[in-house]
Image (cartoon, grey):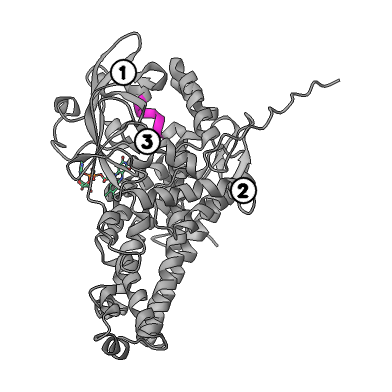
Amino acid sequence: MTATVAAPAETNAMFTGDEFLASLADGREVWFDGEKVSDVATHPAFANAARTVAGMYDALHDPETADVLTTVDRFGHRTHRFFAPSYSAEELRGARGAIEHWQRMAYGWMGRTPDYKAAFMAQLAEGHAYYREYGANALEWYKQSAAKVLFMNHVLIDPPVDRAAERIDVRDVFVSLDRSDDNGIYVSGAKMVATGSALTHATFVAVNSGVAARMEPGRDDDMALVFITDMNTPGVKLICRPSYEAAARSPFEAPLASRFDENDAVVVFEEAFIPWENVLVYRDVALAKGFYAESGFFNRYNLQGSTRLAVKLDFAAGLLLRATEAAGTRNFRAVEAAIGEIIAMRETVWALTTAMVAEPEPGIGGTVVPRLQTAAAARLFNTNAWSRVRELFECYLAGAPIYTVSSPADLDAAELRPTIDRYFRGTGVDAERRIKLFKLVWDALYSEFAGRHALYERNYAGNQEQQRLDVLGWAEARGDADRMRAMVDDCMADYDLNGWVTG
Ligand SMILES: Cc1cc2nc3c(=O)[nH]c(=O)nc-3n(C[C@H](O)[C@H](O)[C@H](O)COP(=O)(O)OP(=O)(O)OC[C@H]3O[C@@H](n4cnc5c(N)ncnc54)[C@H](O)[C@@H]3O)c2cc1C
């Protein structure tokens, strides 16, 4: 008789929206506008974004959406599909569906929803042994992350200062070890920047692959650290950028900024205590260099990022259609070409996600992850796509969005309203609808929120040169470049000075 191992009993500890909001009032030190924020979930700089994320947590429990969003992992945790490792293309496709569903709730305008860092956390289920004596910590963090659908942010990048110096010589700013004792390690330094961090449960801290590649054993050990810190750790400060949500006067004026503004914050550690159970790599340059490539994070975060952008491009295409219709320019040939281009871009990005889920490669421990080269190509296409969208809006919607009123109060001014109704009407739409539509365009393309989004799209996946260098590096490492060279050699072998060599 073959012994069968019983599947673990299913548990459901996923946060609900209310539990998520309550979990944020944990004493974390968040600085905004000269003040420590006592509860981010109710503060005007963060409350609406928090409510948007809470809605995503509620959807995990909603019978209408639970199936598309959740699965049960091998430990029995009911969890978001991207929070569990995928063991087949079918499971990866399901994970994409869950990413898409959450993204549609924000029309593609929140990059760092909780599923972003799940790209990394899910792989700890099978990849925990990489962390050697800290492997049990990694596995426990997987379980916590999957069970609760934890919202993690990450910081990989050093602050933009003294970049030409050796990192170890910038200890006054870059994150490094102060000391350790029986209970854990103490670290100081700053990181640039933690998107969404004010609303998250924990920060993942490491160095990106480009910087890690330059680290040397013996010299950089005190900076060869990978750890996770709870947001309420004493000595951890979040120093936030301005809030576009707080600045938004009404949904009518800023329909995106007022609910999808994921604040980016500088994270500062001042003798912050990290218990040993939160340490993954300690003074080990080789492991600090290798974790990024080993984890499958790169392959997987590009699936999350591509799916998010695909949803956003759907939205952009709809927005240009609606706006050019309202301007009465929709049927001009050049305008149609611009709309067609954005639609082709969304098709391209959706197709890239399909390639990533349909033709994955083996990951750690029997998992599958999107193929590395496809993920790298998607990363490069994606980070350049949004600037083209902005260019098309600027050229083909041109000045139409600036033909607007200062605020909804103008529409409420009885004396002015007839004038507005007459002169601000659109093609086939009344003045109020036209103004509403073009304020949405403004928020998406030209507001401060929009400017930050453009900067995010361009840079969130690393600097532009590194993105290209990685494509080449992996083509060399995986033999693609040699196959390309061989093709040219074959072609040149077809002929010589005397003509065709082959028949
Ligand atoms: C809105 C936004 C949100 C972000 N959120 C996060 C986040 O949540 N977590 C996180 O970790 N990071 C985040 N980032 C940071 C992001 O990952 C970095 O901006 C990105 O990796 C590029 O790094 P950098 O800005 O340091 O630019 P750099 O790496 O300094 O690149 C700028 C240019 O400088 C040159 N250069 C720099 N260094 C070298 C070198 N050593 N050798 C040769 N040339 C060099 C290159 O020409 C390069 O193109 C965010 C950034 C933005 C804008």
Q: Distance between the residues labelled 1 and 3?
A: 33 Å
Which of the two labelled residues, at mark 1 and mark 3, occupies the earlier sequence position?
3
> Where's residue 27, x and y in %?
32, 31
Q: Residue 283: which numbered mark, if any?
A: 1
> Where's residue 109, x and y in %?
39, 57
Residue 303 visible, this angle: no
Callout 1 secondary element: loop
Q: Residues within 10 Å of mark 1 (few under 14, many from 20)?
A: some
Q: Give amino acid for label 2.
A: Ala
Q: Residue 352: which numbered mark, if any?
A: none
Q: How crowded is mark 2: few (under 14 residues within 10 Å), some or many (20 or more)?
A: some
Residue to which mark 2 is pinned: 66
Query: Does ligand 1 reach within 8 Å of label 2's beta carbon?
Result: no
Q: Distance between the residues labelled 2 and 1?
A: 42 Å
Q: Give amino acid for label 1.
A: Arg
Residue plotted at (58% across, 36% down): 367
Using the image as rendered, state which of residue 360 and residue 421 is in the foreground.
421
Q: Give the range drawn in magenta.
A: 288-292
- Quadrant placement of the C terminus: bottom right
> Where's residue 464, x and y in %?
28, 51
Callout 3 secondary element: loop
Residue plotted at (32% across, 22% down): 285
Q: Give amino acid for label 3.
A: Ala
Ligand 1 occupies quarter = top left
Picture quadrant of residue 451: bottom left
> Where's residue 112, x and y in %?
39, 47
Q: Residue 25: which numbered mark, if any?
A: 3
Closer to the eye: label 1 or 3: 3
